[in-house]
Image: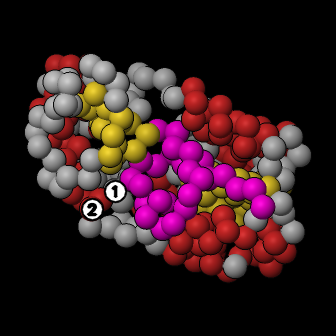
Amino acid sequence: MDCPISVQDIKERLHNSKTVVILTGAGISAESGVPTFRGKDGLWKNFKPEELATPAAFTNNPKLVWEWYDSRRRTLSKLKPNPGHIAIAKIEKLVKEFALITQNVDGLHQLAGSKNVIELHGNIWHVKCTACNKVSLNKDVPIKILPFCECGGLLRPNVVWFGEMLSDKALTKAFVASDNCDLMFVIGTSGIVHPAASIALRAKDEGAFVVEINIEKTPLSVSADATLLGKAGDILPQLL
């Protein structure tokens, strides 16, 4: 049975909240035209992302992996934040304490104006040296293949690949934020990939009111206090 809580009810709750956390996934970026990882555009030159986004793939053929990431960066460079991204940036200014936890690596939240962003899976516009571990911003489109650090080490995309652990620092910040919020929005995420999927449940266990916004129901729907079906770009502006 659909939750009877209305957008207006959630709007009032938002404006009365002191600590808000928002968790976003691929769904909000898809509204800007970002291809979903496992969607119909999930093949690149007959390779699946799962075959390219691994440490082993980079070790075996860094040029191929960088060509794929260069293709992704070219696509992203033409895209802009959508009304959902922009509404989230505005929400950050409304509340006393705010944190945005995202599984996305596209940087669209920052382009929209969000400040306190916790990136669980890294950022495609950052590179990391495989020798000295220095992380730096690189927005070159196209990027030089192969790119090297000033120390001489080979650079890699600073994103979390299959088989790698999430950053302890980012994960700790995400858990602390979720454990201490009174209102959490979970937007455009499947609720399947862990540990991100557990963040909303942690928040609920600690007493937060959890609102899910998605185009379809997910495994989280049965646990959320409210589920609003539709696009984030349509729903979030109504909360302002």
144 or 216: nearer the viewer: 144
Secondary structure beneath label 2? helix
Q: Which residue is mark 2?
A: 77
Q: Does residue 233 sit above or below 144 in this rendering?
A: below
Q: Residues within 10 Å of mark 1 (few under 14, many from 20)?
A: some
129 or 51: nearer the viewer: 129
Q: Residue at x 57, y 35 (%)?
A: 170
Query: Is label 2 in contact with label 1 (beta carbons under 8 Å)?
Result: no
Write down the quadrant of residue 127 in the picture: top left
Q: Does residue 202 sit above or below 59 in this rendering?
A: below
Residue 112 counted in the magenta span? yes
Q: Which residues are magenta?
A: 96-121
- What kind of residue is marked 2? Ser
In the image, taking residue 9 as reference, residue 41 lies left or right, namely left
Q: Which residue is mark 1?
A: 35
- Badge count: 2
Secondary structure beneath label 1? loop
> Given the current orientation, which residue lies at the most extreme front position?
150
Specify whether residue 35 is in view.
Answer: yes
- What kind of residue is marked 1? Pro
216 or 26: nearer the viewer: 26
In the image, taking residue 164 as reference, residue 75 lies left or right, namely left
Q: Which mark is residue 14?
A: none
Q: What colouring method underlies this structural image? A: secondary structure
Residue 120, horizontal then vertical, whole percent: 52, 39
Specify whether residue 6 is in view.
Answer: no
